[in-house]
């Protein structure tokens, strides 16, 4: 069971820490940028609810949610393995368990006191995981549905989410549509409309843009910009219908919010709506499952939002399943992957 694996990893970490601190005058020779011991212990403590949830969901999930629960279990196991390897490689000081737990609690309290309402909300959601189990919300999908529902309903959360997405967007895009393409950019799930506002300036005066999102304040940033007369907003779910024949369909940081089935549905919808000259542009942050922080981010995406991080091979598999071909792929200087796909 994952819960037993977590306990075993904690005991191994404690044992190695005691052995590393037996001699007098033990000092840390940790290189700059390495993961420190307190950070590792915080990760282990923060991971405990995820382990409980993954074990619970895997054992009790209905068939429809068993796949998502299995993905979560794999992500937690991978993170536990990295936690154990990272702890073994550190020249650690001997610290008491109380010190580590206190630091973990301090970090949680810092998140709860954050001026960012979204950060406070997500910190509370992490603390609620065990209580969610007792209320029967035992699958990642149920937890994610509640998260998205509350973000949509509460304006301060939706605006904070938009600000977060704007701050983490890339400016290094190199998109060149064909001359025969219809001069329309569809920003699928575009939120504040910041990508539409940025790209419409580079595409030429013939082009217009449409931001599609179901949030009440969708497109608010685009309507404040100088190109607001060229950008329209459709407040609807991007999973239902899209304008047909657009020159570009943009999916910027969208697919990592969705599970495989929903991602495939959205890509097929884009494929059905696209013309032969249409470009479907997918933008996602780089992700390496063997990196400690990236692994933690994958667990957060699964448990809080019902999505998952994917490597390049997994994205290309999704494109193939949606009858799309990869026309171009590159990584921006600020570590975003850009996939340009077209209909076969």
Image (cartoon, helix red, strand yellow):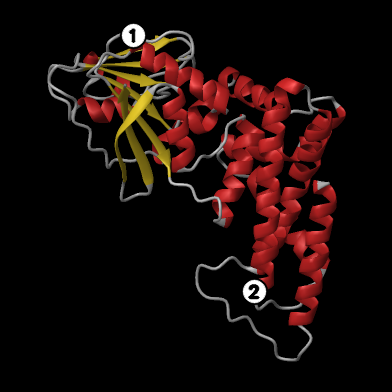
Name the N-terminal-most of marks 2 and 1. 2
Q: Left or right: where does residue 321 sit relative to residue 2?
A: left
Where does residue 198 sit, x and y in percent of width and height?
26, 30
- Quadrant where the C terminus is found in the figure: top left
* Residue 136: quadrant of the picture: top right
Residue 280 can be seen in this image = yes
Element assignment for label 2: loop
Classed neighbour count for the residue bearing mark 1: other residues with Cα under 10 Å, few (<14), some (14–19), many (≥20): some
Q: Quadrant of residue 217?
A: top left
The image position of residue 144, as x and y in percent, is: 65, 27
At horizontal 57% and vertical 36% (from top left) the residue drawn is 308
Tell me where residue 127 sits by quadrant: top right
Mark number displayed over residue 67: none
Q: Residues within 10 Å of mark 2 (few under 14, many from 20)?
A: some
295 left or right of 341 in image: right
Q: Which residue corresponds to the image point at 68% horizontal and 23% vertical from the top-left? A: 146
Q: Which residue is mark 2?
A: 90
Judged left or right of residue 204, residue 123 is right
Kind of element beneath mark 1: loop
């Amino acid at each position: 069971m994952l819960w037993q694996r977590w306990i075993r990893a904690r005991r191994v970490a404690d044992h190695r820490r005691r052995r590393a601190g037996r001699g007098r005058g033990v000092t840390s020779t940790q290189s700059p940028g390495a993961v420190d011991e307190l950070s590792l212990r915080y990760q282990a403590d923060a991971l405990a609810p995820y382990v409980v949830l993954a074990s619970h969901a895997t054992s009790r999930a209905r068939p429809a949610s068993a796949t998502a629960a299995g993905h979560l279990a794999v992500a937690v196991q991978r993170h536990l393995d990295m936690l154990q390897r990272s702890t073994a490689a550190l020249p650690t000081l001997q610290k008491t368990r109380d010190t580590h737990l206190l630091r973990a609690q301090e970090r949680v309290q810092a998140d709860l006191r954050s001026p960012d309402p979204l950060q406070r909300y997500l910190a509370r959601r992490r603390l609620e995981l065990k209580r969610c189990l007792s209320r029967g919300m035992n699958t990642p999908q149920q937890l994610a549905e509640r998260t998205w529902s509350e973000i949509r309903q509460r304006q301060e959360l939706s605006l904070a989410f938009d600000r977060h997405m704007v701050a983490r967007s890339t400016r290094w895009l190199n998109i060149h549509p064909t001359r025969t393409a219809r001069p329309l950019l569809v920003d699928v799930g575009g939120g504040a409309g910041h990508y539409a506002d940025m790209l419409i300036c580079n595409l030429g005066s013939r082009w217009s843009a449409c931001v599609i999102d179901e949030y009440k304040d969708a497109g608010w940033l685009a309507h404040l910009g100088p190109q607001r007369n060229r950008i329209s907003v459709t407040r609807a779910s991007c999973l239902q219908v899209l304008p047909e024949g657009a020159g570009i369909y943009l999916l910027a940081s969208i697919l990592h919010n969705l599970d495989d089935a929903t991602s495939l549905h959205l890509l097929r919808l884009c494929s059905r709506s696209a013309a032969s000259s249409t470009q479907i542009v997918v933008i996602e942050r780089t992700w390496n499952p063997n990196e400690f922080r990236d692994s933690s981010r994958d667990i957060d995406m699964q448990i809080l939002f019902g999505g998952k991080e994917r490597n390049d091979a997994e994205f290309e598999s999704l494109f193939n399943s949606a009858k799309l071909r990869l026309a171009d792929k590159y990584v921006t200087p600020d570590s975003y992957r850009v996939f340009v796909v077209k209909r076969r």
